[in-house]
Image (tube, rainbow, N blue to C red):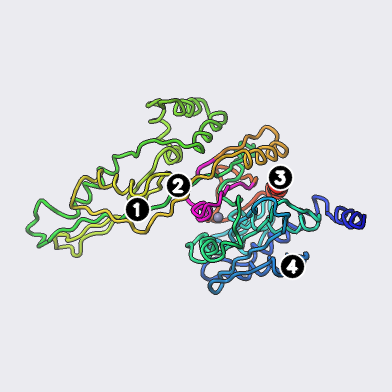
């Protein structure tokens, strides 16, 4: 009985949607306007600003920490305590952004401007929308007096764009207890729009593994006036020619099968038929060949390796003693260690070309599309955007989810933030986010977090 008035007061205190939008907008603006470009910007300032908001909202200082492994590289980790019936839910976003120069942009990239239905500014889409939404959501849940059945952890991190040294991988390695969770939500997929029409709400459950190799051919060399048939540049070039003609085998996974299955309902005629045909067992060869002509579809179906750098010789008038290339591979998750290197050696088919990994690969196993995550995502998507399907995706690039998955924490890239598929400005000029889409994403993630914690 004593609790009843408190609960009533807490419910009454919950501001209606316009007030939630206003609050989110203020947090978002503050974040966008703190420059967090590496190394000139200051991630710690952004982390501290968000920590201050949480403390002002009543979070105990012990549950709001800024961890700063290096100057300007602060990470915020905050916790809303739950009953502990289940292991925690981690809400992740990165605070750092890619360089943006005033002279390249129409407006100042570090002043948030609302214009024609969009918010403009560096980080408005990557990744300060999610960062701001997590802070606004945590404050809202606390105001409601919400008692989740698991702790809800928010981590806003450094070093996503430039390298893993001080961000999520550092947290996993040095403060695992602070961020340990059963499930994490992160960037990695959003909603897809075409000319304003909502096509699908993405959920990234898997991503390809980054690994690069150095290819090197050496030769005794000599004077270029007396050429010989064996030449380091020719041997390397011939090997690269064989690699160019080679395709890794097609291999579909739970995630990419679900992707093509659902995309078949959205794609135009022939493409849709091809997507269905590659799902058959065995996949239809002609359909495979046609789909492979799209760089995206090709990358979704197989490991890719491509030459990205080339270097060789030491003088215009000397036979080359060395020729070297870098080959960057994006390996399907689940591929056994060493398999890509062995394939490269076989395809290059020349003992004179050595193949050496540039750095050890960090495998990140796919996170399963289990009902405990898929049902809530599908339910909230149906509530907010009736008829819009949920689309499982595999990232062809990498996000910080890789460090979580590598550490055994299931991670899903899901935001409910819709954007035009043909207008991705992340890392580019005049980055922006739709005003309506930001507020919808706020509501989507709020509801999703509740479903995942009650
Ligand atoms: Zn990002």
Q: What's the distance in space between the residues labelled 3 and 2, CA to CA?
A: 29 Å
Sequence-wise first label, 2 or 4: 4
Along the line of sight, which residue is nearer the eye, 88 or 322?
Answer: 88
Ligand 1 contact, mark 2 (Cβ < 8 Å): no
Seen at 73% across and 47% down, the residue is 454
Label 1 sits on residue: 308
Q: Callout 2 environment at 10 Å: few (<14), some (14 to 19), or many (20+)? A: many
Q: Is any atom of residue 390 visible in this view?
A: yes
Q: Residue furthest left?
A: 226
Question: Depth-wise, is mark 3 or mark 2 nearer the camera?
Answer: 3
Label 2 sits on residue: 208
Helix, strand or loop under label 4: loop
Q: What's the distance in space between the residues labelled 2 and 4, CA to CA?
A: 39 Å
Sequence-wise first label, 2 or 1: 2
Q: What's the distance in space between the residues labelled 1 and 3, CA to CA?
A: 44 Å
Label 4 sits on residue: 60
Give how far across and how far down residue 307 sits, in percent.
32, 50
Helix, strand or loop under label 1: strand
Label 3 sits on residue: 451
Sequence-wise first label, 1 or 4: 4
Question: Depth-wise, is mark 1 or mark 4 nearer the camera?
Answer: 4
* Residue 418 location, quadrant: top right
Seen at 61% across and 37% down, the residue is 390
Q: What's the distance in space between the residues labelled 1 and 4, CA to CA?
A: 50 Å
Q: Is any atom of residue 103 visible in this view?
A: no
Q: What's the distance in space between the residues labelled 2 and 1, CA to CA?
A: 18 Å
Q: Name above or below for residue 168 compared with residue 254.
A: below
Query: In the image, is 2 to the left or to the right of 175?
Result: right
Magenta segment: 393-415
Along the line of sight, which residue is nearer the eye, 260 or 111?
Answer: 260
Q: What's the distance in space between the residues labelled 4 and 3, CA to CA?
A: 25 Å
């Amino acid at each position: 009985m004593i609790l009843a008035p408190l609960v009533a007061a807490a419910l009454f205190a919950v501001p209606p949607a316009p007030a939630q939008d206003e609050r989110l907008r203020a947090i978002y603006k503050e974040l966008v306007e703190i420059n967090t470009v590496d190394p000139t910007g200051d991630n710690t300032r952004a982390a501290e600003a968000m920590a201050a908001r949480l403390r002002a909202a009543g979070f105990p200082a012990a549950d709001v920490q800024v961890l700063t492994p290096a100057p300007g590289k602060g990470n915020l980790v905050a916790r809303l305590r739950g009953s502990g019936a289940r292991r925690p839910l981690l809400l992740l976003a990165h605070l750092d952004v890619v360089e943006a120069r005033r002279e390249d942009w129409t407006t100042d990239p570090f002043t948030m401007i609302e214009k024609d239905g969009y918010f403009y500014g560096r980080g408005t889409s990557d990744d300060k929308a999610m960062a701001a939404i997590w802070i606004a959501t945590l404050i809202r849940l606390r105001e409601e007096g919400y008692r989740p059945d698991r702790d809800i952890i928010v981590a806003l991190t450094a070093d996503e764009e430039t390298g893993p040294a001080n961000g999520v991988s550092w947290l996993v390695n040095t403060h695992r207890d602070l961020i340990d969770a059963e499930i994490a939500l992160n960037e990695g997929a959003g909603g897809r729009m075409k000319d304003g029409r909502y096509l699908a709400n993405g959920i990234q459950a898997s991503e390809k593994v980054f690994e690069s190799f150095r290819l090197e051919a050496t030769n005794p060399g000599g004077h270029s006036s007396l050429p010989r048939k064996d030449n380091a540049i020719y041997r390397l070039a011939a090997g690269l020619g064989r690699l160019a003609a080679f395709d890794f085998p097609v291999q579909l996974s739970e995630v990419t099968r679900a992707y093509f299955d659902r995309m078949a309902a959205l794609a135009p005629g022939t493409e849709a038929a091809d997507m269905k045909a590659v799902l058959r067992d065995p996949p239809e060869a002609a359909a495979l060949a046609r789909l492979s002509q799209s760089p995206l579809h090709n990358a979704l179906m197989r490991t890719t390796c491509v030459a990205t750098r080339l270097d060789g010789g030491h003088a215009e008038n000397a036979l080359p003693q060395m020729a070297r290339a870098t080959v960057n591979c994006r390996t399907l998750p689940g591929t056994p260690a060493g398999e890509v290197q062995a394939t490269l050696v076989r395809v290059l088919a020349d003992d004179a070309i050595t193949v050496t990994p540039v750095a050890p690969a960090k495998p990140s196993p796919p996170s399963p599309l289990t009902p405990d995550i898929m049902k809530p995502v599908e339910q909230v998507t149906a509530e907010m955007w009736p008829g819009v399907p949920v689309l499982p995706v595999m990232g062809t690039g990498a996000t910080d989810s890789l460090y979580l998955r590598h550490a055994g924490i299931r991670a899903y890239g899901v935001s409910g933030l819709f954007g035009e598929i043909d207008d991705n400005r992340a890392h580019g000029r005049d980055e922006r986010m739709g005003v309506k889409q930001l507020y919808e994403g706020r509501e989507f993630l709020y509801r999703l977090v509740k479903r995942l914690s009650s």
